[in-house]
Amino acid sequence: MSERKPHIISKVSDWPIYKLSQNRYEFIQNVNEEVLHRLSDNHGPDFESLLEKTAYLEKIRIKTNAWKVDPRDEKKYWNGLAQSIKSNSLAEDKEILNKEILKRIINRYSEEITGNFKIGTYRFAVSFLTKLFRRILNTFWSTKNRFYWGTKRQLYDRLELDGYIEEMRTLFSKGTVVVVPTHFSNLDSVMMGYILDRMTGLPSFAYAAGLNLFDSEILAFFMNRLGAYRVDRRKKNPVYLECLKGVTRLYLQNGVNNIFFPGGTRSRQGSIEKKLKLGLLGSVVEAQRANFQKGDNTKIFIVPVVAGYPFVLEAKSLINQFLRNSGKEKYIHSRDELSILKKTIRFFKKIMNNSSKIHLTIGEPMDVMGNLVDKDGNSLDTNGETIDIKDYFIGRSKVLSENAQRESVYTKILGEKILESFMRNNLVLAPHLIAYLAFQYIAHEKKKLSIFNILSLNRKEVYIPLEEFKRVVAEAQNVLFSWEEEKVLKLDKAIHLSPEELIMEGINTVGIFHPQKTLYMDKHGNIKSEDLKLLYYYHNRMRGYDLQEFIQWKSPNESPILQEV
């Protein structure tokens, strides 16, 4: 069990996110002013082309990709603005008129994006989530558990934290902290916030949430009051993007700690992010420079976090999206042979008879340039010497100034450092390793087939002999043990089990809440899968290490993997 930490700020009313919410109107006005100033520098003085482009893109969005959560007056609003922009083109004072239109658009976006935080809602959410997670993460029909719905103690036993926890807590008194996690599920925001609150004792974070999640009235009610700021990825126009960055920058400049998912969206294929969206990360670099320009030496710290789940509830739909988008005509969607009734019964049976753990690995804190920092928040170079990152923002003129091209390079470097941290702090779990090795076994047996052909194989005919798989697992373990010593990755304690025990642990825990069995053992002792796509999804969690290159896949007398029935 991870040790539960006390809150570093005991009164919720003293939390930065609550203080900002108390001054939400003033905050939005500050965002509006800053965004208008930046757009004036880049697009002024009459803004005509900027407004035309914005209205055009918004009208296309409304026509081709409308959502339930959109304001009811969207179509009327943008049609009216488009007409006003057209009328202004002939007016003598069009610069003044266009500026007023731009102000209205900016305020509309700022109001939409900026979140709120209510103490009562926060306390209710903590109580509700504690009950929910006690149920999901504890075994119902356990002879050792007389409390059918689990206790708080049992819940906290199943929340495993590792890594630089104390360092992260200490940095809250040194500056503003931005947590950048991997992203696999829609539950990530809720789970991440809950664990950081309950287990690390950190005050609530502001966090970016996709506007699509607000389609649900219940979710919208809570997210609107728990620090979420809304991100609409359909909106690509420059005014909206500047507003989004403006909200983010000013959150940070006001000392509000943030959770960013730098991948931008959930990993469709189930792998750790290999490429990041740099927009919001760029706002972190900009906010740090803006602090320095104001004479404020408050630093912004980046803390990568890797989440590890034995299951992702949306895994089936995510992998189907990935395969459909990447395979196009090569992808053949196969029907699920299990009936709805059978799937429902199996799902609830698994809920009642399985328990799971959630793993979070806290990576090494760094500054906005990707340099590691010590416990006092000092930036360190590769030799461990203290450096002043303010120097990064001073150009040839020896003046601390904004330089978009330079800061874009810094943002790219920061992204690369975060990706390196993700891979280095990935905790290899038994279900992910066994899924990886099982799918690789099948792939190496069918080398002549494309991935789409493999996924279309008759799963009833695909099996892995246990004894041969034990040899493969043992070889993989030896490689992983050496990588752990070299700090290439981290290993869960289950990886140190005997090969047979590790196999059974992986089979019993991989994707346990799916109606389909991701892996199972038949009556002959062979390992099979009811859903090769799910197996591929969980296999992908280990992509990027090229573990398959270090394993002997074929034995001299092994039988073929496909058996005629």
Image (cartoon, grey):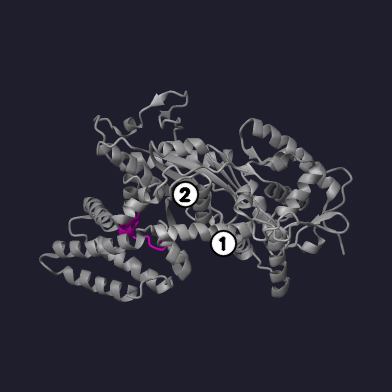
Residue 189, visible in the rendered structure: yes
Tell me the residue that label 2 is attached to: 262
Q: Residue at x 41, y 48 (%)?
A: 258
* Marking on residue 93: none
Tell me residue 261's x, y (percent): 47, 51
Residue 192 percent coordinates (x, y) = 51, 51
Question: Label 2: how many residues lie within 10 Å, few (<14), some (14-19) or many (20+)?
Answer: many
Q: Which residues are magenta?
A: 232-245
| Foreground residue among 135 and 96 | 135
Depicted 112 relative to depicted 483: above or below: below
Label 2 sits on a secondary structure element that is loop
- Name the residue located 44 percent from the left edge and 38 percent from the top edge: 413
Q: What residue lies at 29% left-to-right and 64% top-to-bottom?
A: 108
> Can residue 444 be seen here?
no
Let me know if residue 530 is in the magenta part.
no
Depicted 340 relative to depicted 273: above or below: below
* First-in-chain label (2 vs 1): 2
- Report the front residue among 83 and 123: 123
Look at discs 2 and 1 and give the one toward the viewer: 2
State the residue at coordinates (69%, 32%): 482
**Kind of residue sitting beneath label 1:** Asn
Which residue type does callout 2 highlight? Pro
User: In the visual, does 492 lie left or right of 161?
Assistant: right
Q: Are marks 2 and 1 in contact (CB under 8 Å)?
A: no
Choose between 145 and 207: the one closer to the eye: 145
Image quarter hosting the C terminus:
bottom right
Location of residue 561 with respect to 421 vertically, above or below = below
The answer to which quarter of the image holds residue 532 is bottom right
Quadrant position of residue 231: bottom left
Q: How many numbered dots are placed on residues in this image? A: 2
The residue that disc 1 covers is 325
